[in-house]
Amino acid sequence: MSAPTVLALSGGVGGAKLALGLMHTLPPENLTVVANTGDDFTHLGLRICPDIDTVVYTLSDLADKDRGWGRAGESWNFMAALGRIGGEDWFNLGDGDMAMHVFRTQALAEGRTLSDVTAEIAETLGIGPRILPMTDETVATVVESANGDLPFQHYFVRDRCEPAVTGFRFTGIADAKANAEMMTLINGSYLDSIVVTPSNPFVSIDPILSLPGVRDALNAQTSPIIAVSPIVGGQAIKGPAAKMMAELGLPSTALAVAEHYRDLIDGIVIDEVDNEQADDIAALGMEVRVAQTVMRTLEDRKDLARICCAFGAEIGL
């Protein structure tokens, strides 16, 4: 039996972990990872793409596995020097990480697209699967909060997710064009399944789904769409998803995640600790797979990837 062809929709750390498992499970030509770019921003004159870079570092084995973000073996001389002269140092840029941002910023200034730059970086670092930005246009996630509207990185990094959120919007989304390669895959007959990775539904996955034409294309195609819940036992494994849900008046549960995606997905993978929610999720009209979803090791990532692929195959029968 041939290996399935999979399109994965990803945010940062959680999505990158599952993408790594999929990379170790599938032939490189069978996997495409679409990364959220709503988190992208220009800082110190440099174009920063946090989710793309997290996926790139993870799949190239350059990620700092202990810290959970950035490059391994990083040094911080630039930030220390910037702070000493009174520069804006709330967003940490490691010395090695700076090379990525300088290279990207220069290439974009020369008129190249973010897709082209990302592909070149991935190829140079020996990454087999395709990594696609969700769009080549500028889209910016704005967090609507009790403290007013905040650019995402100001909320997430500078303010440490402390302001209570009231909603989200994505500036530039109405005029942005979804990545052409992503749309070709969705609209064609190439895919065996589409995997919504365990990334934040509101600020990592919703920007991708909110691009003009994406949700309609996903609903029109016949490949099974499965999601992996980022909420386990009422908590987010990484990031502020559970906090956001509580502040939006939503229960912090796998069931609430399934309800958020109910018009899109055919099935959802939930963790074993949330097994009691399986019947309620199934009542929404989707398939449910209960599994170990917390990815602490590479084997955990590979196991979850295999579960996702098998689940998609079963739904697609």
Image: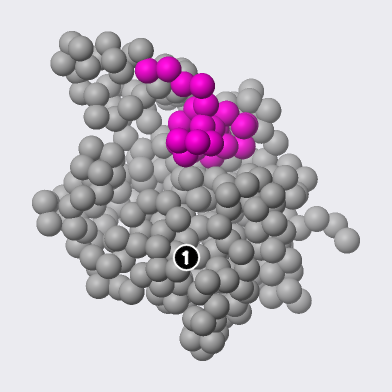
Q: Residue at x 80, y 55 (%)?
A: 3
Main SS class of the magenta portion in the image: loop
**Crowd class of label 1 (few under 14; some 14 to 19; many from 20; radius 10 Å):** many
Q: Residue 55: within the magenta?
A: yes
Q: Position of residue 85 (x, y in %)?
A: 18, 11
Measured from the top left, where is residue 228 in percent x and y?
54, 64
Q: Report the quarter where the C terminus lies.
A: bottom right
Please give left or right for residue 54 compared with residue 316 in the image.
Answer: left
In this rendering, position of residue 190 left or right of residue 125: right
Q: Classify residue 4 by image quadrant.
A: bottom right
In the displayed structure, would residue 14 be above or below residue 129? Answer: below
In this view, the residue farthest toward the left is 147
Q: Nearest the camera: 1 or 106? A: 1
State the residue at coordinates (62%, 74%).
289
Quarter of the image for residue 292 reads bottom right
Up-down relation of residue 148 to residue 79 (above or below) = below
Q: Is residue 138 left or right of residue 84?
A: right
Report x, y in % for residue 153.
28, 40
Colour mapping used in the image: one colour
SS at mark 1 in the image: strand
- Residue at figure coordinates x 45%, y 35% from the top left: 67
Residue at numbered disc 1: 232
Whether residue 180 is visible here, answered yes or no, is no
Quadrant (top left, top right, bottom left, bottom right) of the N terminus: bottom right
Q: How many marks?
A: 1
Residue 271 visible in the current orientation: yes
Q: Residue at x 27, y 22 (%)?
A: 44
Q: Please state which amino acid type lies under the numbered disc 1.
A: Val
Region in magenta: 52-76
Q: Position of residue 123 (x, y in %)?
A: 65, 28
Q: Is residue 199 magenta?
A: no
Above or below for 14 versus 306: above
